[in-house]
Amino acid sequence: MTAARLTLPSPAKLNLMLHILGRREDGYHELQTIFQFVDYGDEITFAVRDDGVICLHTEFDGVPHDSNLIVRAAKKLQEQSGCSQGIDIWIDKVLPMGGGIGGGSSNAATTLLGLSHLWQLGWDLDRLATLGLTLGADVPVFVRGHAAFAEGVGEKLTPVEPAEPWYLVLVPQVSVSTAEIFSDPLLTRNTPPIKVRPVPEGNSRNDCLPVVARRYPEVRNALDLLGKFTEAKLTGTGSCVFGGFPSKAEADKVSALLTETLTGFVAKGSNISMLHRKLQSLL
Ligand SMILES: C[C@](O)(CO)[C@H](O)COP(=O)(O)OP(=O)(O)OC[C@H]1O[C@@H](n2ccc(N)nc2=O)[C@H](O)[C@@H]1O
Ligand SMILES: Nc1ncnc2c1ncn2[C@@H]1O[C@H](COP(=O)(O)OP(=O)(O)OP(=O)(O)O)[C@@H](O)[C@H]1O
């Protein structure tokens, strides 16, 4: 009998705005942010094995096997569910690491949902999101798969329906450490909370931007170039920079001009993640 096998997407996210309200005692920062997905990402293939072994076959530069968020997610789920099955995993990695588009967190979420399905655990999204939060602040939104206004460290999620433009995402060739940006003394940490719902138009600032742009000339350059065509924004702590366009043709046109010197991709914004659309189609 062939082992159960499944290939699932692992999309990127963008932070459409990001405010930092304060710092908690554990060092993490209280945020208000809007997450939206894009139809662009990695693809992860899973094949069940019955000997309990968890093996990621694709090598990552600079990330040891057991530190990979895919492996950590699989091991935690196996431990907490008491499952005796194992898994072989391969990934087609296209998302840049340290890009602020949540590649690692998305990979962890795709692994949790994929394995819950293949191992037939019957875990609901609440339970998977709670486990996901122990792996990273951005994992819960990928587990839930709906665009969201997020509070806390990103785990208190309210679904939202922002417009779904086409985005040009520029990928400066530099990896930004999230921890480094959050420990910068110059970071704005006292933005007053937005209390009105839905979040009023015009709140599109990212409080990390001044610190990231100051430290990384490559990011500054990308913001300046894209800013000639549309509002250029930073996602998360960068390095990626993005701007919205009303059509694919317009995004492609600017992409053709800018990607002569910079790497980037064009993708549609989406309020339901590709992962969840694929899982729905399997049910
Ligand atoms: C900034 C965002 O990209 C917004 O989407 C995320 O909140 C970052 O999420 P992430 O990459 O999953 O971050 P984690 O792996 O949980 O945290 C990396 C490091 O960033 C800092 N960190 C992260 C999130 C947060 N709300 N406050 C923080 O201070 C902490 O020093 C932490 O050790
Ligand atoms: N499967 C994985 N994919 C990417 N990075 C991983 C993975 N597993 C572990 N990592 C580690 O996590 C770090 C952050 O990766 P990630 O791609 O999530 O960054 P990011 O896009 O900046 O995320 P965020 O927006 O959540 O800050 C990487 O530099 C890498 O060391």
Image: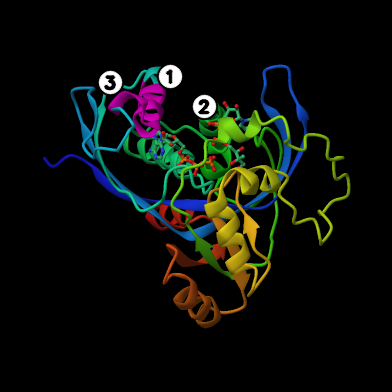
User: Residue 21 at x, y = what percent?
Assistant: 79, 35
Q: Residues within 10 Å of mark 2 (few under 14, many from 20)?
A: many
Q: Say whether disc 3 or disc 2 marks the residue closer to the N-terminus.
A: 3
Kindly state the secondary structure of the residue where label 1 is placed: helix
Identified by mark 3, the residue type is: Ser
Magenta part of the protein: which range? 65-78
Q: Is residue 158 visible?
A: no
Residue 139 coordinates in the image, percent (x, y) = 53, 37
Q: Dot 3, how many residues are within 10 Å of its Cα: few (below 14), some (14-19), or many (20+)? A: few
Residue 235 lies in the magenta-colored region: no
Residue 92 as seen in the image, left or right of residue 215 = left
Q: Tag 2, which secondary structure?
A: helix
- Residue situated in front as seen by the camera: 124 or 58: 58
Which residue is at a point 56% across and 29% down the rendered structure image?
133
- Mark 1 sits on what residue? 80
Marks 1 and 3 sit apart, C-alpha to C-alpha, by 11 Å
Q: Are marks 3 and 2 in contact (CB under 8 Å)?
A: no
Residue matched to label 3: 84
Question: As displayed, is residue 261 above or below residue 21?
Answer: below
